[in-house]
Image (cartoon, rainbow, N blue to C red):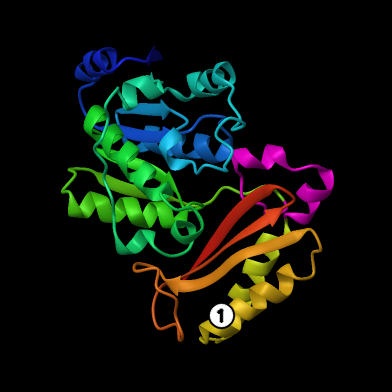
Amino acid sequence: MNTVSSLFDLRAARLSLNGTVGLVPTMGYLHEGHLSLVSRAKAENKHVIVTIFVNPTQFGANEDLSKYPRDLERDLSLLRPLGVDLVWMPTAEVMYPSGYQTWVEVDALTSPLEGAMRPGHFRGVTTVVAKFFNATQPTKAYFGQKDAQQAAVIRRMVTDLNFPLEMVICPTTREADGLAMSSRNKYLNEAERKAATVLFRSLSGAKALYEGGERNAETLREKMKAVLATEPLAQIQYVSCADYDSLAELEIITGKALLSMAVFMGKTRLIDNFVLG
């Protein structure tokens, strides 16, 4: 497994990879969700590139950039057995050199949900992912469904900017009790970790209504809120029942829809979602 940090070394290493290449962008502190993306990329491509970069431009002024969990040696030890060809670990100076002033922005899709709660977040995401695509030239790029709006935004960017690659969105990897795996789960204390299963239960409750024939979106939103309200530690930031592609809030579900939410457990912000239809 080749590990590089500079753009020069990345490009030299990339030239040696002949055949299809799967890219898995990460911010490190890897868990089974990340590793499932790597395994799928390995199964579908001749080569796999993983990026590890905690991207400062997608964090807001009051967010957890300095505290974001990092353990590079552990990450590399998890990747080695999976047959990864190349790990790129750029520094912030490599990605954003002195005088940097170029950004990639997707408009309407970044306005609601996470975009409304985290101004500027998606500008950082789309810019860094576009730079990853340019630098690594992948055949396929792998992302998790847990970050549903991110997947939708990057999918739009790939289409609009004619990136010659295929986006692969993989199912959310969950703990045995339903909690979506996330690097931020390590912030939860014992009581918060136990309480955090309420996100999965609230989504499951709304999905059960949908599967029973309910198509009124507000009814599903109210169901999610009602289940979340049973957990005293849960502080709702938003719940949503939106069109899968446009992310516009729905009144009546007629096609593919996205149930999603952001909830604070203490100081830890958790997100989760289900796709309907």
Residue at 83%, 43% (x, y): give it.
190
* Badge 1 element: helix
Judging depth in this view, the residue of 46 and 242 nearest the camera is 242
Q: Quadrant of residue 44?
A: top left
Q: Magenta stretch: residue 11 in it? A: no
Residue holding disc 1: 210
Indicate the amino acid at tag 1: Tyr
Above or below residue 191? Residue 129 is: above
Q: Quadrant of residue 271?
A: bottom right
The boundaries of the magenta stretch are 177-196
Where, quadrant-wise, is the N terminus in this rendering? top left
Q: Is residue 196 left or right of residue 26?
A: right
Q: Quadrant of residue 84?
A: top left
Q: Magenta stretch: residue 190 in it? A: yes
Residue at 44%, 28% (x, y): give it.
53
Residue at 57%, 47% (x, y): give it.
173
Residue 118 appears in the figure: yes
Residue that sits furthest to the right in the current view: 191
* Circle 1 residues within 10 Å: few <14, some 14–19, many ≥20: some
Above or below residue 132? Residue 6 is: above
Judging depth in this view, the residue of 111 and 197 nearest the camera is 111
Number of on-image labels? 1
Residue 277 appears in the figure: no
Q: Is residue 72 left or right of residue 188?
A: left
State the image coordinates of residue 204 (x, y, percent, origin top left): 64, 68
Judging depth in this view, the residue of 7 and 14 nearest the camera is 7
State the image coordinates of residue 273 (x, y, percent, origin top left): 54, 61
State the image coordinates of residue 92 (x, y, percent, origin top left): 39, 24
